[in-house]
Each structure stands twice: as structure tokens, then as C-alpha cells.
Amino acid sequence: MRVLVVEDDERTAALLRRGLVEEGYAVDLAAEGPEAVWRGCEVDYDAIVLDLMLPGLDGFEVCAQLRARGRWAPVLMLTARVDVDDRIRGLDAGADDYLPKPFSFGELTARLRALVRRGADQRPVILTAAAVRLDPAAHRVWRHGEPVDLSAKEFALLHLLLRHPEQVLTRTFIIDHVWDDAFDATSNVVDQYVRYLRRKLDDPGAPSLVETIRGVGYRLHIPPATGPDTPSGPGPGTASASE
């Protein structure tokens, strides 16, 4: 297993490298944020141990840039800061786990083993489909770069569909993940909320982003890109969390 350790303290970096090598890992070191981004993009690491406080770019930005560039190696973020908001920010930036300093080396290696078992599957921080973008952490949605106002259930339904692109989701599956046991799978609540999403997200005259699979359920279809219409980044605005 090849691991990138990003730590600007030379003594800590050396101790981590020695310990991980003894555990059988191949270890590369980076001491600055820009170097970490470069290495993370050039090498397919099995995991990344990422310190939060770094020169050049902090750990939040390093993680966010790696995810934005399609690099999905599991990230274990290290920090001496114990603020809950920092832990939340790190996880929302794309980190997979968080370990406060000082830490047990045995716990670090156990967490690394757990992360490596999960693999480097794609786990984008921002979910996109055509001109639609959804930020789960900020609870925001944009269409063509403009904010879209969604209710809580509309947001949850879109989030579910974006997590399963090109997959046919049955009405029962959707109800189980967006509503609860109080809803009857034979009700038309799913169809009703799909109609709400279509009115807010579909372009006039264009095929709907959410396809009806007759007799089964729905599928989020991502058409091939035909031009530079998809926004390059989220714009301002917040989707409503009210039902």
C-alpha cells in the first residue's frame, strides 16, 4: 500500500514515515499544501494522511482541490485543533476520517486499514448532473449557476437521485430513503415530488433530467455534454430547508 503523509513538522513526519514503513507501507512525504495537491494528482495513493495546518494551502483546501480534480484516495485528516466546527469542515471538504493530535500510532494505522478497505471509490463533495449542482453540506442547489429553492423533501429526493445516476430506483426504494415507514409505497407521493423537481430543474423543451421508467420507478439520466453550458462552480444562494 502506498501512502502520502502530508505534515510540515519534520519530526512528526519522520516518525510517521518510519512507523508506517515498519507496518509495510510505501510512504511519500509532502511538507506544503501545493506539493500535497501535486503529489496527490500525480500518484494513485491508497490513502493520504493529511495534517490540517500547512504552509501554502491548509488541509481543508488540499482535500477540496484533490476531490475537485477527481482524486478519491481516502483521506485521514490530522489536527491539533479540537473545535467541532473544524472537524465538520474537514469532513465536508472531502476527508473520510479525522484524528486529533496527540494520537496513538496504533489507532492511526487501524483507521488507515479501515479506509484502505473502503477503497478509492468516487465520493464527490458536490454532486452534479448536466446543469444541476447540489452541495449536501451547504444544502444548496444551482441550475445553470443560479440558486434553486427546494423544500426539504425535494432536496432529499434530488440528493438520492444524484447519488444513484443512471440507476432505476423503485418507488419503494425512494420512499424508504426519503420518507419513512409511515408512507405507503403505493401512494403517489413520489410521483408528486418528481413533478415538483421537474418544474424547477428541467429546461423548457428539453428531455427531463428525471426519467420515468413505466411500471418501475425513476432514473436520473445525465445527457452527454454538448457545450460549455454547465457552470464551472456553484454560485451564491441557499436552497430552502423548509417543507
Image (cartoon, rainbow, N blue to C red):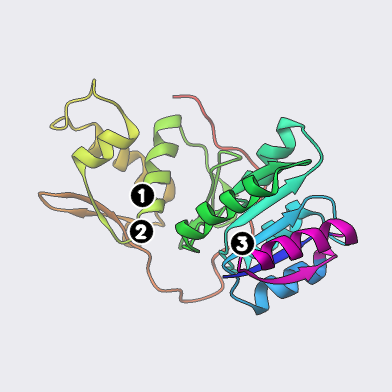
Which residue is painted at 31% across and 61% down in the image?
A: 166
Judge depth for marks 2 and 3 and give the one in front.
3
Mark 3 Cα within 10 Å, few/some/many (few <14, many 20+)?
A: many
Q: Could you tell me if residue 124 is visible in this image?
A: no
Q: Place residue 6 in its image quadrant.
A: bottom right
Mark 3 and mark 1 lie on one chain; the one further toward the N terminus is 3
Q: CA distance from mark 2 to mark 3?
A: 19 Å
Residue of label 3: 67
User: How many tags in the picture?
Assistant: 3
For the view shown, which residue lies furthest in the bottom direction?
42
Residue of label 1: 161
Quick one: SS at disc 1? helix
Q: Magenta stretch: give its range.
A: 8-33
Mark 2 and mark 3 lie on one chain; the one further toward the N terminus is 3
Q: CA distance from mark 3 to mark 1?
A: 20 Å
Residue of label 2: 165
Three-letter amino acid code of the residue under disc 1: Leu
Quick one: SS at disc 2? loop
Which residue is painted at 57% across and 53% down in the image?
A: 125
Q: CA distance from mark 2 to mark 1?
A: 6 Å
* 68 shown above or below 154: below
